[in-house]
Amino acid sequence: MRKILDYVRLYFRLTAAGIRAQMQYRFAFVMRIVGMIAAYTGTAVTMWVMLYQFKELGQWNFHELLFLFALAVLSWGYCIILFFHFRSLDTYIVNGTFDRFLVRPINPFFHFMAMKFDIGAAGQFIFSIMIFIWVSNALDIHWQIGKILFLLGAIVGGVLIQGGLLVFISAIAFWTTKSERFYWVVMYPARNLTNYPLSIYPKMVQWVTAFVVPFGFVNYFPAAVILEKETPFFQSYIGYLTPLVGIVFFALAYFVWMLGLRKYKSAGS
């Protein structure tokens, strides 16, 4: 227990140093937040234009789609803070700079994770909170304590699932010295799927995003529980499994990462 507390204190010290470094460029920080909010707002406007004529998509109306989207954006914001830099692990391996994470008396995974704390993800948080407030009023969502706790658990599960996939992708670099290109092949398409309800996709896609790369648990299944929507082909209680799915998926990703670490051979000179 004491060792865990030591790691927690160390993590906050490392991230505090990273935040101070990022705040040296405040204009760039603010513009990044504005850019993120503008980009996500553009996606929301695209949804509105798409539903202007048809009113619903897979029996989800515009406000329900916004809630689905905002939930994915919120968990992605936390994922960016904690794990986004894992996608560039191959750069550290090729340059030989990854070696420094192996010669210090702390867990290499923890050290690499704490290396960067991207506060630019504040744009995701601001956008998501604004959408949650708006949609909660539009859909008359009553946030009792149970529903709030469920939402928090869903966010944690979503962060672990998306972070787990980034860790999986980064682990490829231990064997191939290449990983970032897999982000665009796997992670980017998987995240785009979460913009819309899984019910609009073929059954095979729904099955893959539930049991192989479980991005359905990032927002679709939890949102269906909160909004009391049906989930065709799946049991109604499946959304409650989101935190468990996140923990299991991330644990598997961590195992693969550590397995790759044991296979690691320095590429530095």
Image (spheres, rainbow, N blue to C red):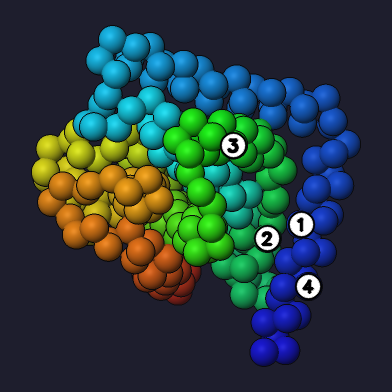
Where is mark 3, residue-wise? 133
The kind of residue on which mark 4 rests is Arg
Cβ atoms under marks 2 and 3 closer than 8 Å: no
Q: Residues within 10 Å of mark 2 (few under 14, many from 20)?
A: some
Where is 44 relative to 70, above or below? above
Residue at screen point 67% across, 82% down = 4
Where is mark 1, residue-wise? 15
Where is 77 relative to 264, above or below? above
Choose mark 2 or mark 4, whichever is in front. Answer: 4
Where is 236 relative to 263, above or below? above
Q: Marks 1 and 3, how far apart in space? A: 30 Å
Residue 6 numbered tag? none
The kind of residue on which mark 2 rests is Ala
Q: Which of marks 2 and 3 is nearer the N terminus?
A: 2
Q: Position of residue 228 (x, y in %)?
A: 32, 48
Where is mark 4, residue-wise? 9
Q: In this view, does 177 lie to the left or right of 28?
A: left
Cβ atoms under marks 2 and 1 closer than 8 Å: yes
Choose mark 1 or mark 3, whichever is in front. Answer: 3
Q: Where is residue 105 in the image (x, y as percent from the top left)?
A: 71, 79
Quarter placement of the C terminus = bottom right
Residue 114 numbered tag? 2
Q: Is residue 246 left or right of residue 16?
A: left
Going by the picture, which residue comes out furthest to the bottom? 1
